[in-house]
Image (cartoon, rainbow, N blue to C red):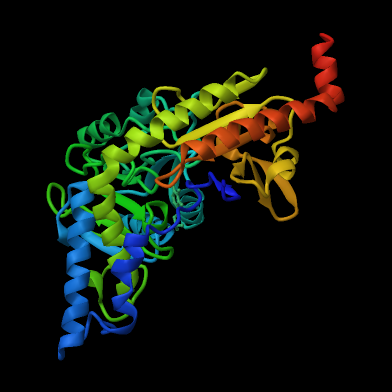
Amino acid sequence: MLQLPVYLDNNATTPCDPRVVAAMLPYFTEIFGNAASRSHPLGWAAEEAVDNAREQVAKLIGATPKEIIFTSGATEAVNLAIKGVYETYTTKGNHIITAVTEHKAVIDTCKHLEKQGAQVTWLPVNHEGLIDLSELEAAITPKTILISLMYANNETGVINPVRAISDIARKHGVLFMTDATQAAGKIPVDVNNDGIDLLTLSAHKMYGPKGTGALYVRRRSPRVTLTAQIDGGGHERGMRSGTLNVPGIVGLGKACELCMEEMAADTQRILPMRNRLEKALLEIEQTYLNGAPGQRLPHTCNLSFKYVESETLMMGFNKKIALSSGSACTSASLEPSYVLKAMGLSDDLAHASLRFGLGRFTTDEQIDFTIQTITDAVTQLRTISPIWEMYKDGVDL
Ligand SMILES: *Cc1c(COP(=O)(O)O)cnc(C)c1O
């Protein structure tokens, strides 16, 4: 029997892998020491566990352990990276380049800095969700200190041409930071091959626990320095004070190790399921794929079902399939996704979109069920829709 709901919201968060939980458990009760306690074995054991996790995280992205700073998640890591660079490199300039389709963590951090006097260039995207590289290069000025562009988009799965971006950044001596929260652990990411200076990731997007993440900070060519955003005991080489979340960090490390070992196999299983789901749903009349078809994460698929409100669609089956719509609840109103809007979708099409986020635990049976359920629901809603009837009657809408 298929267990409901079918979980297809892995871009919002993933379940913890049971192997991650098993690795974490001893660090709550038995090995509970403070990793900063240097005077007894319980502290040493905790520190050793943190060191091991630091190596596991570093390995996943081709970094060295000393370049990893543990945080409470990607949001904190993004804040530390962007604000930390802004405050440190103020003598060089105050200009930051980013894009309109970034995660709110990046957008709101940049908006905050704008109020403090930062100059921010907000790059637009084309209908596939891609920035124009010549536009990026043209935006660089002598005052540019940072380019912040995500590795892969959380709503559409669109992957940025990271290497081409870093080549431009290097050429102009500008630091390049990437929010790799959706990409790390899912596709190969290598800070050296990719030319990345700062990178953020989060455990709960890669089968680890919530509330733990990391920031990669390059130490060599160039050596990046940051201004701390949290002051205290000088943990994490002074860049992020606060007692380390040892079980969480152990979980993040284990999650990275598992992703490293199983990424290829996971993709080999997930990609055909994603493609099958996508192909079947695109067979529904007036259904559109959002995002560059050949440049997306293997587990993500974003579709618009024209003339169908995704919120209404979800009400029909939301106890059976857990996923996200292209509408975001901001205060009292439903706003269409700013990512889809930036790609040129109308409010209607953005409100008619669903994001399917598959994961390590998605099964073929769940995909069968989803195809059937969504197809039935869309068909059903359209039969009772006056707008659909008008469209079928050839009325120009
Ligand atoms: C989830 C997500 C974040 C935020 O991560 P948290 O660890 O939940 O703070 C940032 N960027 C992207 C692209 C994400 O998907």
Residue at the spot 45% in from the left edge and 53% down from the top edge: 14
Judge by depth and name the residue closer to the eye, 119 or 354.
354
Residue 110 x %, y %: 46, 51
In the picture, measured across the screen, residue 137 lies left or right of residue 300, that is left
Residue 264 x %, y %: 27, 38
Residue at the spot 41% in from the left edge and 59% down from the top edge: 16
Residue 186 x %, y %: 34, 42
Q: Which image quadrant for residue 95? A: top left
Q: Which image quadrant for residue 305? A: top right
Residue at the spot 39% in from the left edge and 31% down from the top edge: 271
The extreme left residue here reads 220
In the picture, measured across the screen, residue 365 lies left or right of residue 350, that is left
| Count of residue discs | 0
The C terminus sits in image quarter: top right
- Whether residue 52 is visible here, answered yes or no, is yes
The extreme top residue here reads 394
Judge by depth and name the residue closer to the eye, 252 or 272.
272
Judge by depth and name the residue closer to the eye, 100 or 260.
260
The extreme bottom residue here reads 39
Whether 311 is drawn above or below 236: the answer is above
Residue 50 x %, y %: 22, 70
- Whether residue 397 is visible here, answered yes or no, is no
Whether 53 is drawn above or below 278: the answer is below
